[in-house]
């Protein structure tokens, strides 16, 4: 779903537009011209749908250079390893708490254990650990082609929550995860 000339919604679950796996959060593609970035990864179960939608918009998933995660919950970060593999080794960026949980494959930290008990995730769903190359904090920037995404620390929903601000096409766009 094209939102602006440079921002696309490429994943969304049952609480949104049902584009991909029902458990997925909104997953955004940012077109920086020569490079692409994703904001959030979904659960990982919808990765084929996400890459299909990216291709339908005329983009090659191998051009994705960054996956920027707003926070560590399974519906936002659980698919990081699957997205990384599907896109051919992009660089993952996250706040310190999220980075640690991803590297360790910590299902308790990402809220997966609690989500399974509550019936939000099926008992067989497993979280795959994932390398994180960029530890982000307040004021960090990530250049995506000709765009710059600025990180803002926005705790409240969970520890280590980030939002990403980008200016493109005369607009300021804020990716806030669940905050």
Image (spheres, rainbow, N blue to C red):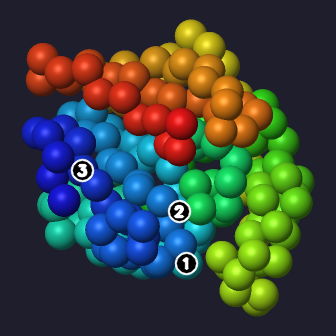
Q: Tell me where residue 48 appears, x and y as whole percent.
A: 42, 78
- Is there any visible trace of residue 118 in the rendered image? yes
Residue located farthest toward the front when viewing the structure as drawn: 118
Q: Tell me where residue 146 appears, x and y as whole percent.
A: 27, 22
Query: Which one is in front, 111 or 62?
Result: 111
The residue located at (60%, 24%) in the rendering is 154
Gap in angstroms between the C-alphas marked 3 and 2: 15 Å
Which circle marks residue 45 in the picture? 1
Mark 1 or mark 3, earlier in chain: 3
Labels 2 and 1 touching (C-beta < 8 A): yes
Decide if residue 30 is on the left or right side of residue 62.
left
Which residue, given by chain and number where applicable, does mark 2 sit on?
42
Gap in angstroms between the C-alphas marked 2 and 1: 8 Å
Name the image quarter holding the N terminus: bottom left
> Image height check: is 30 above or below 147?
below
Number of labels in the image equals 3
Mark 3 or mark 2, earlier in chain: 3
Q: What element carries label 1?
A: loop
Query: Which one is in front, 150 or 117?
Result: 117
Q: Is mark 3 on a helix, strand or loop?
A: strand
Query: Which one is in front, 60 or 159?
Result: 159
- Is there any visible trace of residue 66 in the rendered image? no
Q: Tell me where residue 45 appears, x and y as whole percent.
A: 55, 78
Name the image quarter holding the C terminus: top right
Gap in angstroms between the C-alphas marked 1 and 3: 20 Å
Query: Which one is in front, 23 or 37?
Result: 23
Which circle marks residue 8 in the picture? 3
């Amino acid at each position: 779903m094209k939102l602006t000339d440079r921002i696309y919604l490429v994943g969304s679950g049952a609480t949104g537009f049902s584009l991909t796996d029902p458990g997925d959060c909104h997953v955004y593609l940012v077109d920086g011209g020569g490079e692409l970035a994703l904001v959030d990864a979904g659960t990982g179960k919808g990765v084929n749908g996400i890459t299909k939608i990216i291709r339908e918009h005329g983009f090659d998933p191998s051009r994705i250079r960054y996956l920027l995660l707003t926070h560590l919950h399974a519906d936002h970060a659980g698919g990081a390893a699957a997205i990384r593999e599907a896109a051919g080794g992009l660089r993952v960026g996250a706040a310190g708490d999220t980075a640690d949980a991803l590297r360790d494959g910590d299902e308790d930290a990402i809220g997966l254990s609690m989500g399974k008990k509550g019936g939000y995730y099926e008992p067989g769903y497993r979280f795959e650990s994932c390398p994180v190359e960029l530890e982000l904090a307040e004021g960090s920037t990530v250049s995506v082609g000709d765009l710059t995404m600025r990180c803002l620390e926005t705790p409240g929903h969970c520890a280590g929550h980030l939002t990403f601000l980008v200016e493109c096409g005369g607009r300021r766009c804020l990716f806030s995860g669940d905050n």
